[in-house]
Amino acid sequence: MAMQAKDDHGTMCDINTTPLIDIMLVLLVTLIVTLPVMTHAVKLDMPPPNLHTPPPPTPPEVINLDIYYDGAIAWNGAGVKSMDDLEAQFKQAATENPQPELHLSPDGHVKYDVVAKVLAAAQRNHMEKIGFVNTAQFVQF
């Protein structure tokens, strides 16, 4: 039932509900069409779980390479006399299987030139796993 009202001049004022019903029907149809898409599940044929998984590989050896403020270099705590000795140790480490990880820990006051030379020597000798450790000293607040 529509609401009817008459004013003093006899004109009739009704609310036109047709656009509201049209919008409601459009929304209902949209809901009906999109609902199956939202609930659609994709069936996947997964391989059965392998009960005999191989053990995890052994972690590689870690080489701690410290570079001190005066440019001195220590390989796992033992001092390195020259860059030629360092390159020889890099060559020997690069041939190991698995190749060891190189954890580079430069002092905060060492010259960049020394660190760059060590990184270049490691790259020349095919060291693939190089990472910087203890870098919290470089963070300035």
Image: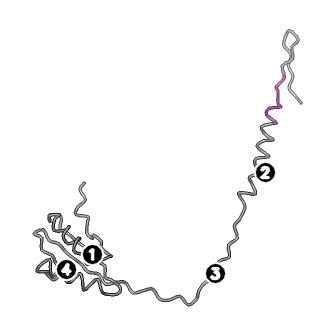
Q: Which residue is mark 3?
A: 47
- The one nearer the camera, 82 or 19, is 82
* Inter-mark Cα distance, 3 to 1: 39 Å
Marks 4 and 2, the one that precedes in the sequence: 2
Q: Secondary structure at mark 3?
A: loop
Looking at the image, which residue is at 12% across and 78% down? 82
Q: Is residue 130 above or below residue 50?
A: above
Please tell me which of labels 4 and 1 falls first in the chain.
4
| Cα distance between the residues tagged 2 and 1 | 60 Å
Q: Quadrant of residue 43?
A: bottom right
Residue hosting label 4 = 87
Foreground mark, 4 or 1, reads: 4
- Residue at 79% x, 46% y is 29
Q: Is residue 25 magenta?
A: no
Q: x, y (%) of residue 57?
A: 42, 86
Region rendered in magenta = 14-21
Residue density around tag 1, few if under 14, some if 14–19, many if 20 or more, within 10 Å: some
Q: CA distance from mark 4 to mark 1?
A: 16 Å
Category of crowding for the residue at label 2, using alpha-carbon neighbours closer than 10 angstroms: few (below 14), some (14–19), many (at least 20):
few
Marking on residue 32: 2
Query: Marks 3 and 4: which is nearer the front?
Result: 4
Callout 1: SS: strand
Q: CA distance from mark 4 to mark 2?
A: 71 Å
Is 28 on the left or on the right of 111, as rendered?
right
Q: Earlier in the sequence, mark 3 or mark 4?
A: 3
